[in-house]
Image (cartoon, helix red, strand yellow):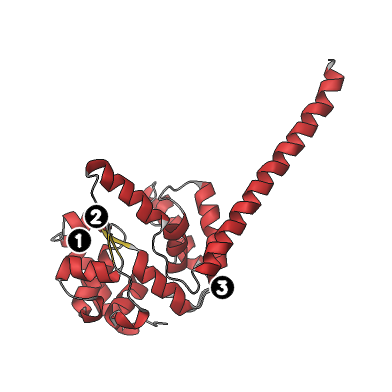
């Protein structure tokens, strides 16, 4: 076969490959959309992050189980809601999934430090990542996180987003959700958390497994004090 005859065949195969890849990508987005619609009314029993952590735990202990217990929005202390808003996303009820000023500040901080030290992710973005994705920081994962975030923001109310977030985020080694966290650290229900306890739990969110192992870390106490001082200004859905 001459080079002149080979080139059109290669071009046709490349076009077919692109179409197949596009089709697979479209099917994946439809699959995600289906889960977002389902979870608008049905509480998630598990998330991608939970599955990853359970595999890690069972590599060391085949009988390991996650600590998690779903509770309704009204059964979670308003102190914890306020603490998470001010610590993770103080514009939560106002934005449509992305805090562009926060992202810009995170970029500037990372450039100044020469490494990734801040993410600028909103509660909606964190939820999308926890539900569907992995902890990796690849461009693909960030792009997919953005798409899932748009779906969630378009289809769920702010209260539903926050309710699911409160019930699925990681709070320790195998500990997920507000109820499990309150019982794991304080032996009480999520509804009973005081302002001080809530501020401390909110301070753990960026590094939950580290703080689970180092509960007396001075840095956590300082973070909790700052969060506690800002909590009265929180706008909760």
Residue 11 position by quadrant: top right
For numbered disc 2, what is the local secondary structure?
Answer: loop
Residue 133 at what x, y percent from top left?
46, 53
Residue bearing mark 1: 219
Q: CA distance from mark 1 to mark 2?
A: 19 Å
Tags 1 and 2 touching, CB below 8 Å = no
Residue bearing mark 3: 155
Q: Is residue 179 left or right of residue 98?
A: left
Residue bearing mark 2: 173
Residue 117 in sight here:
no
Tags 3 and 1 touching, CB below 8 Å = no
Residue 16 at what x, y percent from top left?
75, 38
Q: Nearer the viewer, residue 63 or 137?
A: 63
- Of tags 3 and 1, the one toward the viewer is 3
Q: CA distance from mark 3 to mark 1?
A: 38 Å
Residue at 52%, 63% (x, y): give it.
35
For numbered disc 3, what is the local secondary structure?
Answer: helix
Residue at 27%, 80% (x, y): give it.
79
Residue 217 in sight here:
yes
Residue at 41%, 52% (x, y): give it.
110
């Amino acid at each position: 076969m001459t080079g002149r005859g080979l080139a059109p065949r290669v071009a046709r195969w490349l076009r077919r490959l692109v179409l197949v890849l596009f089709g697979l990508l479209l099917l994946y987005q439809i699959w995600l959309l289906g889960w977002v619609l389902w979870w608008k009314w049905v509480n998630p029993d598990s998330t991608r992050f939970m599955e990853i952590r359970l595999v890690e735990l069972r590599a060391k202990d085949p009988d390991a189980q996650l600590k998690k217990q779903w509770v309704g929005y009204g059964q979670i202390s308003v102190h914890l809601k306020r603490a998470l808003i001010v610590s993770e996303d103080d514009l939560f009820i106002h934005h449509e999934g992305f805090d562009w000023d926060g992202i810009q500040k995170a970029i500037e901080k990372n450039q100044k430090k020469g490494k990734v030290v801040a993410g600028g992710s909103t509660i909606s973005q964190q939820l999308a990542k926890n539900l569907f994705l992995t902890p990796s920081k690849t461009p693909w994962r960030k792009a997919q996180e953005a798409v899932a975030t748009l779906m969630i923001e378009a289809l769920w109310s702010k209260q539903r987003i926050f309710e699911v977030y409160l019930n699925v985020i990681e709070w320790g080694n195998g500990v997920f959700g507000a109820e499990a966290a309150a019982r794991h650290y304080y032996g009480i229900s999520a509804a009973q958390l005081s302002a001080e306890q809530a501020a401390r739990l909110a301070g753990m969110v960026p590094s939950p497994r580290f703080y689970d192992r180092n509960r007396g870390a001075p840095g956590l106490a300082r973070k909790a004090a700052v969060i506690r001082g800002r909590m009265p200004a929180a706008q909760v859905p």
